[in-house]
Image: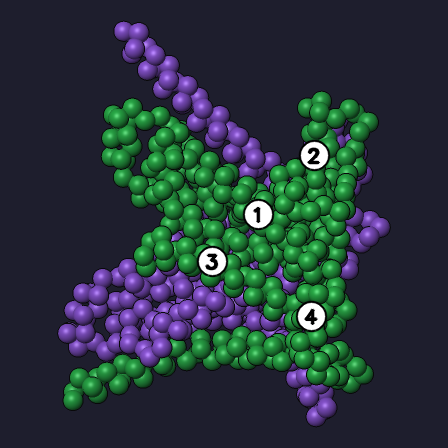
Amino acid sequence: MRGRRKGRTVVWLRRAGVYLGVAVIVAWTLAPVTWLVISSVTPYNELISDRATHWFPRHPTLANFQVMFDLSSEVGERFVFAIRNSMIVASSVTAICLVAGSLAAYALARLRVRGKKALVLSLMSIRMLPTITLVIPFFVLVSYIDYGFMNIGSSFHLFDTKLVLVTLYTTFILGFVIWIMRGFFLTIPTELEEAARIDGCTRLQVLRHVVLPLSSPGLVATGILSFLLAWDEFLLALIFTRSNNAITLPLFIAELGSQYITAYDQISAAGVMAAIPPVLLALLFQRFIVQGLTSGSVKG
Amino acid sequence: MLLRAHDASERRLAWWLLAPSVALIVLVVIGPLLFALYLSFQDAEPTVGGISMRFVGLANYVHHLVQSDLFWMAVRVTVYFTLVSLGVELILGIAIALVLNERFWGRSVVRAMILLPWAVPTVVNARMWEWIFAGSKFGALNGLMKVLRVFPPTHDQVWLGFDVPFEAVPVLGSLFKWMGVTRALNMIIVADTWKVTPLVAFLVLAGLQTIPSSLYEAATVDGAGFWRKLTHITLPLLKPVLLVILVLRTMELFRVFDIIYIIMQYSIRVLGVLTYEVGMKFLHFGSGAALSFLVALFILGLALVYIRLFYTEDGY
């Protein structure tokens, strides 16, 4: 009797402990973003009041968001270009990575290729390479190329264009995409492909009609992961972009607010907007992403 | 004969499939990498209408390794950042995964929500925490400390400041002393950990779900408590997952640039920031390239250590 009661107390304590842990995790996860969202709807004069007594805006406002879309203001113009550039760059990178990456991944997963092992290993080492190692030669090469075009009187240039960003991002993300997609292709039973081959399909038809449909969760996961990686990139954008022609959202947000006025109202609003696409993607496609991450890194 | 023809066509197809990726990687990674190696032996700087180069042999490497103490200072800061972040991420990640692996009301919602910090872009994360750590009465952390009566109402802590200059502190001696290094670096570790720990927790959670519950039942029958189960079943079986996390995270932490640069500019010189400063701010291309190769070699060395661990521990 006493034993059973003791057991019940232990179970109860354990449940209480779990809920306490969950509460702490939820608070720790949500508090910083909540503060970001609150700050984004607070007018500047309230934002710089004493925090200990003043957490919530008395006069909540959407003015900080309005500024971002006001094309007549300098900040607004730059923001609209930045978000447009980020969208274009991230979706182009995703599209190119998915096509080129899954073809390569299929070859590496299923076909006989000479030096396959070396290829897979070098893909992995590219992932380990610090971006900065490639940034310096890129910068010198891009300047050489642009000088060359200038000298022959052409106005074509690579510096400060979306083209250079897309090329660089694609290459950096490609290794990652090949890695994850290869993992997905390896999980598809070969019997299905063999059956299709016996029915007279060519390799490419097998890829199109059997393998790709079966690996669509993998394609969704890698697509979203590449989009997030491209959306997040900072260092290359910092070096290769200047003007509205190519500046991306991360660079815009890092630049916001000068040394004299730290415009945390605007920074918060821009931050909220820059976080919305990746957060939505992550929450909506959570299951795919986790599957992709685990197959890419755990099984890999 | 037929088989060989079939084999050849398969090889050709494989190369067609690989061609776009390989071409991109050769053009944008291998080529520039070789060029960087060439640059690292030059004294290369921009001049009017081009770039001047002068062969200097190993001078750039010697400069960083021997003549200038900036490199070793950056190594110490980077090692500190990497080790502390890794420790915090692993312990918190495992703890969060263990909690989320339990049954509780609203579990799927909480599990989905925890991916949120991971999805927040690094730049947004950096500026969000910069604002939370604002060293004035506007700062949210200062406000919280006052509400919790940790600080008196008049005290405003400068969170992103320097108590002790990093140069004055030997790394290993102060590794575990919270206040022994610059407070700013520790605060950045908090910010970075907030974003990355959920990912670690997710990977650990995936690993936890592969452990058969019968093992725990058997252990319970044998009278094992929570701690024994953790150290004798959970952690040993999580080892492959933990090793992968260790490899990926060490590399990412060791080459860290954006979050530190955005919050502190050049005030905290981890290796990534120092390389950027030398190569892209002062435009010493050769010197910067040499520095970046030293960073890459460090990471390669770490990778080899880990790969050895993999090979010996798991036999593949």
Question: In this picture, is A264 found above or below B146?
Answer: below
What kind of residue is marked 2? Leu
x, y percent for residue A90: 54, 64
What kind of residue is marked 1? Leu
Look at 49% across and 25% down and name the residue there. Answer: A20
Q: CA distance from mark 1 to mark 4?
A: 27 Å
Please, what secondary structure does the residue beneath circle 2 have? helix
Identify the colour scheme used.
Answer: by chain
**Residue under circle 4?**
B62
Q: Looking at the image, is mark 1 or mark 4 nearer the viewer?
A: 4
Tag 3 or tag 1, which sits nearer the N-term?
1
Tag 2 or tag 3, which sits nearer the N-term?
2
Q: Colour of chain A?
A: purple
Question: In this picture, is B208 found above or below A164?
Answer: above
Look at 56% across and 35% down and name the residue there. Answer: A28
Q: Looking at the image, is mark 3 or mark 2 nearer the viewer?
A: 3
**Residue under circle 1?**
B83
**Residue under circle 2?**
B141
Chain bearing mark 4 = B
Please, what secondary structure does the residue beneath circle 3 have? helix
Q: CA distance from mark 1 to mark 3?
A: 15 Å
x, y percent for residue A67: 73, 52
Compared across the picture, whether B163 is left or right of B193 comes to right
* Mark 4 Cα shell of 10 Å, populated few (<14), some (14-19), many (≥20): few
Rendered-image quadrant of the C terminus of chain A = bottom left
Q: Nearer the viewer, residue B17 or B217?
A: B217
Tag 4 or tag 2, which sits nearer the N-term?
4
Tag 2 or tag 1, which sits nearer the N-term?
1
Q: Are marks 1 and 4 in contact (CB under 8 Å)?
A: no
